[in-house]
Image (tube, grey):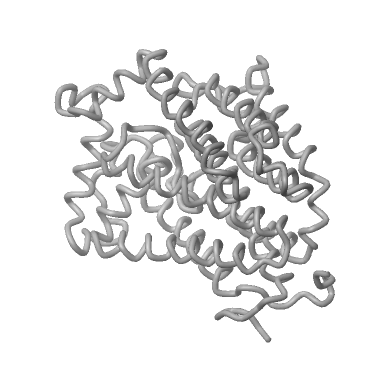
């Protein structure tokens, strides 16, 4: 039997400290990357900074609130979380509710408040999958048993793709395959899932002309330096200008409206320019530490639900951070994907911090507390 909430330990305080440190750094990075653009666009250099700071405070509140729950009681929320995710994703297509920016309808808004449902859907999927597999782990031994998880993941992917948002679609698809793998599915069943998924990627690219243009720009960005290749070229300029130790904090040149989305999808480029290779190395050492501790918490968990929950949330974070780094460095075609806990965007920040609070919650109720950061 697991410990009660009253008997829960301190948990992995190093994991929690690393999450808060990364999110706090993100607030500073957003200010640096956005101050000039905010002044020009809104007449307030602190516009994005203040929004990010509010998100950070709300994220801290979410961590505190979730940390003192018993995560095992969330098991009953698996199906409602999936339904809520699908409903929110569908709401973006309702006129007057969905908000469109840069040709994509990815947000729902009430007055000045906007929410990005795809960020919520990732964790709703994790809650559903963890509950489904934990209820009967034997389900994973057959392809039929994992069909509900594939169906849930496919439904979320289709709705996100229609926004359109291929980058988050790829994240959810990778998360679905990763959670099935972590659950212990057979290699044969995993192959049956992976092969069609991989074959579907080029089909989806061909279906939309703008995706072909982005692929072409990825292959040779200098062929269209003022159009599709512009963003990647500016990102590469920022990376190159950073050299080993960077130009200094707040001293980026590319943030002066040369680099589009400098405070969000391409904030890593600004960080690299200001802190250099060593700064990026330290940043990803911190991200890697969070991922390592998250999987360690999952591995040490004394029940299957907690294992799937902690592993799934950690995997979602790891996938998104990896894809963002690959995009800004020109290793994969440009896609709109924030760096979790760092990029501007309150929905992503608050939901990710809440998810990390849930991983910390799992560590607090873990009975096998025999590694650094846990109390005896």
Is 247 displayed left or right of 79 in the figure? left
Q: Is residue 58 visible?
A: no
User: Residue at the location (77% across, 47% down)?
Assistant: 136
Query: Quadrant where the C terminus lies?
Result: bottom right
Is 211 displayed left or right of 237 in the figure? right
Residue 246 or residue 300, whichever sits in front: 300
Residue 169's spot in the image, x, y percent? 51, 31
Q: Is residue 202 above or below residue 135?
A: above
User: Residue at the location (35% across, 47% down)?
Assistant: 325
Q: Quadrant of residue 372?
A: bottom right
Q: Is residue 73 above or below residue 109?
A: below
Residue 49's spot in the image, x, y percent? 48, 50
User: Residue at the location (29% across, 19% down)?
Assistant: 213
Tally the marks.
Answer: 0
User: Residue at the location (58% across, 56% down)?
Assistant: 56
Is 114 displayed left or right of 83 in the figure? left
Residue 16's spot in the image, x, y percent? 58, 68
Residue 309's spot in the image, x, y percent? 66, 53
Residue 362 or residue 336, whichever sits in front: 362
Query: Quadrant where the N terminus lies?
Result: bottom right
Q: In the current view of this chain or complex, which residue is farthest to the left? A: 222
Q: In the current view of this chain or complex, which residue is farthest to the bottom? A: 376
Q: Is residue 144 visible?
A: yes
């Amino acid at each position: 039997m697991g410990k009660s909430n009253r008997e829960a330990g301190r948990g992995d305080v190093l994991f929690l400290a690393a999450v808060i440190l990364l999110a706090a750094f993100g607030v500073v990075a957003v200010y640096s990357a956005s101050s000039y653009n905010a002044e020009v666009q809104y007449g307030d250099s602190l516009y994005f900074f203040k929004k990010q700071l509010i998100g950070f405070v709300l994220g801290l509140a979410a961590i505190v609130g979730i940390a003192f729950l018993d995560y095992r009681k969330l098991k009953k929320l698996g199906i409602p979380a999936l339904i809520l995710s699908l409903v929110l994703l569908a709401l973006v297509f309702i006129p007057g509710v969905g908000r469109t920016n840069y040709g994509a309808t990815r947000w729902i808004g009430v007055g000045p408040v906007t929410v990005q449902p795809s960020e919520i859907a990732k964790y709703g999927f994790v809650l559903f999958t963890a509950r489904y597999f934990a209820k009967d782990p034997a389900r994973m031994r057959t392809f039929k048993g994992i069909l509900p998880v594939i169906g849930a993941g496919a439904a979320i992917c289709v709705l996100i793709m229609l926004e359109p948002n291929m980058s988050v679609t790829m994240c959810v698809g990778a998360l679905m395959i990763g959670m099935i793998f972590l659950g212990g599915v057979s290699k044969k069943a995993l192959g049956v899932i992976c092969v069609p998924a991989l074959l579907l990627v080029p089909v989806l690219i061909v279906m939309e002309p703008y995706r072909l243009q982005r692929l072409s720009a990825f292959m040779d960005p200098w062929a269209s330096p003022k159009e599709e290749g512009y963003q990647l070229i500016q990102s590469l300029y920022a990376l190159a200008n950073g050299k080993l130790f960077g130009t200094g904090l707040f001293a980026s040149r590319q943030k002066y409206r040369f680099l589009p989305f400098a405070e969000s999808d391409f904030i890593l480029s600004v960080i690299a320019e200001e802190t250099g290779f060593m700064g990026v190395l330290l940043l990803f050492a911190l991200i890697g530490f969070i991922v390592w501790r998250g999987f360690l918490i999952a591995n040490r968990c004394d029940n299957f639900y907690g294992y799937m929950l902690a592993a799934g949330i950690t995997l979602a974070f790891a996938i998104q951070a990896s894809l963002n780094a690959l995009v800004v460095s020109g290793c994969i075609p440009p896609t709109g994907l924030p760096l979790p806990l760092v990029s501007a965007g309150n929905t992503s920040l608050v939901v990710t911090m809440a998810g990390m609070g849930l991983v910390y919650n799992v560590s607090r109720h873990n009975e096998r507390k025999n590694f650094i950061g846990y109390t005896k």
